[in-house]
Structures are given as C-alpha cells and as structure tokens.
Image (cartoon, helix red, strand yellow):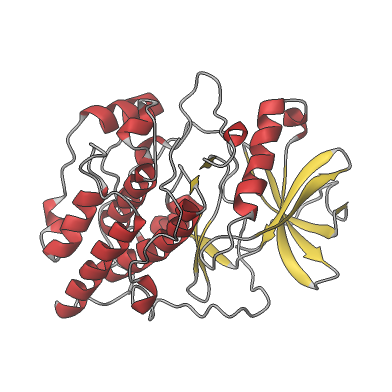
Amino acid sequence: MPPVQNEDPIIGQTFGNVIAKSILGRGGMGAVYLGHHPGLDMKVAVKLLPDLFVGKREMVERFLREARVSGRLQHPNIVRTLDVGRDHGVYYLVMEYVEGVDAQRLLDRETRFSPMRAVNIAGFVARALGEAHEQGVIHRDIKPANILIARDGKVKVTDFGLARSITNTATALTLSNQVVGTPNYMAPEQIKSMDVDARVDVYALGVTLWQFLTGTLPFDGATPMAVLLNVVGENLTMPREVFEPLPKELREAVVAMTAKDPRRRLPNIPAVLAVLKKARDALRAANMDSTAPMQGVARASSPSVKSLADSASRVSPLPPRNDPQSFTKALGSDLNPRPPRPGTKPPTR
C-alpha cells in the first residue's frame, strides 16, 4: 500500500534513529509512519501513541507492552520490533516494514481464498503462534487484519498490543470493565472472562481459517454485543456449499480448532500443525492444490470493541534474510509439528 501523501508536522522529525517520511495510516491506538533508518539504510514502520493517551498510564503501558512482548519474539513469521522510546514527548515503536497487504484486504478484494491457500496462510500463522506460546505469550487477537502477506509470499503476524505474558503479571492489562478483543474471533471462554490459555489463539485461528475458506464469519451480529452473545450461545453451522466439497481432513481441522468448549478444542499449536499437514496432504491428493483467487459469498462485517490501531507494519522489502519462504513451500517440512522446548509450559492467564 503506497504511503498517504499529505502535510503533517510529524514528517521529517526523528524518533530515535529513524526519520519519519510519510503517513501510512491512523488507528485508535496511534498513527503509523513510513520511516527511514539512515544508519542501516532501510525502511521501517514507526507507530506513535496519540497525545491524548500520553497522560493515561494504562494506555501508555499497553503501548509499551506491545514493544516488550513482540521485541522478545524473534521468528520469520512475526513482525520484528526494532526499537521503542520517547522523543518530542511522543512514545514511538519502530518495527520492520513489510511490503504487501494484510489478509483482510485480500479477502475484501478476493472474497475468499482457495482451500490450499487458506491452509498455507493458516500454517504460517500457526508457526508464529507456536513461537509465541513457547515464549509464554498469548496473542489474543488473531484475525485477518493482523496477518500480513508480503509481496514475496511471506506471512507475518503483527499487533501484540493485546498479548498476555505469563512471565510478568504486571504486563497483563485489560481495559477496565470492557471486553477486549475482536468479537467475531474471540473464544467463548475469553468473552466470559474465564482463565484463558493458548487455546484462545487456536480458536481465533480456526475462525480465521473458516473466513478464508468461506468469505464469511461463523457468527455475526448488528452490534459487537450481539456478536459476543452469538459466539457464546449459538451453534456453529458449516455452509454446506463450501465445506462439502472439501476433504474431510480439512473439515475436521476447522471443527477441532473452533470447538466452543476448550476441553474439546485442539489443545496446542503442535496439534494444529498436525491437522493442517493432514489437510494439505488431502488437498493435494484430491488435486485441490491451486492457490488461485476464488469468488464466493460476501464477507460479513467484523465490528471491533478494542481501541488499538490497525496493524502497524505496512509492507516493504527488508535486507535479505536467510528465511526463504513461499507458498510453494507452505505446510511442507517446515510445518511438521515441533515439540515444545524442554522446560516450557503452555501459556496461561
């Protein structure tokens, strides 16, 4: 997405070692600028906390928490955090700049994805979540808008502003008396404010995969509260015209990831990777391995009750890295389930 060209007093200012060049977008949690790091001679994305939040401790802590959490996650499928600080009285967060679009924009354009492409993207997101979970971090806001698809086919997860960490309870903040998350993708136990663990990310990824396949969301409503009530109280029904032609391995994967009862849901990311691998193999066996765009049912709206900016990284080539990925490799040997590292525990609230 090309930068928006307009007059802005921020343009030309320096934040840390980065010069703000142009505005990329604005959201509830801040504005995002295209920046240039002269020392590294590279483009970056710079997220700024709005002035009205600077005096609000909870919002500043939320902003800084995103930097702390994402900063310790080093994975090819996670947007890298490069720096955080305060200049000119403004809190800033510097991230890698990824050239491409988020998956929601692709859905808006294409309506739905081919089964193989949907599984490919979900697999890369699962890899990112696997790393986060091993580091004790739950994302809590997986959705197409927080999944970036680079021009070279790389898939990266962004926006850890709602993440919870088990390593520091002081960073586990929520907005007072508010449900925090995006209603359509929230697991029932998350809505009920029960103790949550990595299975809320499994659920959100399952809903995202559902949306990739159908172009719709399993639960919708006229208001965020209506969506929340439907997620908790309504039964999930698969669109027959979309799911019947799919291999049973893929149908079973979606069902297992989106079970309302967390005890019946896939328990962790290694289990998700295992069922996605089976689904991919079944798609190949059925000659359904095309990744071409598809047309389908109109996408349902997705109201949000969180006041965070949309994904901060909007797409640019970084210096070459040794992480060759493409959709031709998707869900191959790279996505074989990997056992948790010794001594690690599933993240919990």
The residue at the point 19 percent across, 50 percent down is 255
- Which quadrant of the figure contains the C terminus? top left
Q: For this view, does 286 lie left or right of residue 137? A: left
The quarter holding residue 197 reads top left
- Outermost front residue: 343
Tell me where residue 88 appears, x and y as whole percent: 89, 42
Foreground residue among 331 and 291: 331
Is residue 301 shown to the viewer in this render?
no
124 to 172, vertically: above or below: below
Query: At 85% across and 69% down in the image, what residue appears?
Result: 38
Left or right: 112 with respect to 143?
Answer: left
Is residue 215 shown above or below 62? Answer: below
Labels in figure, total: 0
Q: Residue at x 27, y 38 (%)?
A: 219
Q: State the image coordinates of residue 120 (x, y, percent, origin top left).
A: 35, 69
| Relative depth, front residue between 103 and 189 | 189
- Out of 111 and 202, give the one closest to the viewer: 202
